Amino acid sequence: MRGLVKLFEALLAIAIVLAAGLYVGSEWILRRPHDVPDDRLAIPRDAASLAEGARLARLAGCRGCHGPDGQGATWSSDWLGGTIAPPAIARKIAGYSNEELVRLLRYGVKKDGSTLFIMSTAAIRNWSDEDLGRIVAWARSVKPGPQDSLAETSYGPLPRLAMLTGTLRPSFRNVRLAPERRPVETGRYFYDAICSECHHLGMETPMREGGQIAPALAPMAASYDLAGFRRLLRSGAGRSRRDLGLMREVATESAQVLSDAEISALHSYLKGEAARLGRGPGE
């Protein structure tokens, strides 16, 4: 009996040490500071820029994650995963300057220098200075309301372990990719700013969640005529009746606000990339 008690005590001590190591190690990752470029953008105030900022905020996924009116949301909450809750925009950014907000969106770094984890900056950092300025202008126009979520993200043991193993990667980026202005030819621009987070041009990409595979985008797009590609981006409906899952969600939440001209430019760019890569439609 005494031996069992000692074994239990030993196992308990090991568990406490491992839990402490998990917490201390993940807290160091969560709290360490990061240096990023100090981009100072012009933030417009006119009605046309605010309207365009609202549209771009949908394309960037801001309104898909934080709610259509920026009211915030709770994605999940349990003891293993913790609470994953995109915050109410107006409440969260009230204490941020415009420069700090640009660093948050473009480089994934909070005002104290620590990194975000859930919000990806892989695609957002491709938005031009003028377009990101419009998104910031829209975010500033969002007002707090009684519908705002008060939930805060807190990480449980599973995401903390994923941080330590590198399977949950930080949002931090320190390389500037954005042009000053949106280019005239917008096909590649919208691929970089919208599609590249999930899709590579020439190879399949495993998604981080759900076990889905994002197809190589260039040959997939080349397999559609323009009308079919427009329908795909507006409704998430492909050539078959198969539910496209995440693609359907992305289309209905964000991509549907692309203009006909922007969809045409994107389709043309992707078809050209398929030809450059020597990939036929659907290959």
Image (tube, rainbow, N blue to C red):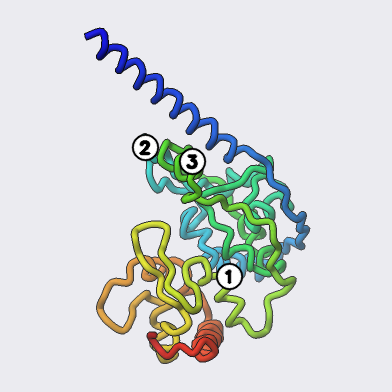
User: Which residue is at a point 49% across and 41% down the rendered structure image?
Assistant: 153
How far is the residue under mark 1 from the one under mark 2?
33 Å
* Residue in the foreground of this view, choosing between 281 and 9: 9
**Considering only vertical position in the picture, is 135 above or below 115?**
below
Q: Nearer the viewer, mark 1 or mark 2?
A: 2
Q: Nearer the viewer, residue 19 or 119?
A: 19
Q: Is 137 situated above or below 247?
A: above
274 vs 133: above or below: below
Q: Three-letter amino acid code at disc 3?
A: Thr
Residue topped by disc 2: 80
- Asked which secondary structure carries label 1, the reply is helix
Residue 151 makes an appearance in the image: no
Describe the element under mark 2 as helix, strand or loop.
loop
> Would you identify the image quadrant in which residue 10 lies?
top left
Asked if the residues shown at circle 1 and circle 2 are in contact, with their CB atoms under 8 angstroms apart, the answer is no
Which residue is rendered at x = 54% and y = 35% of the image? Answer: 25
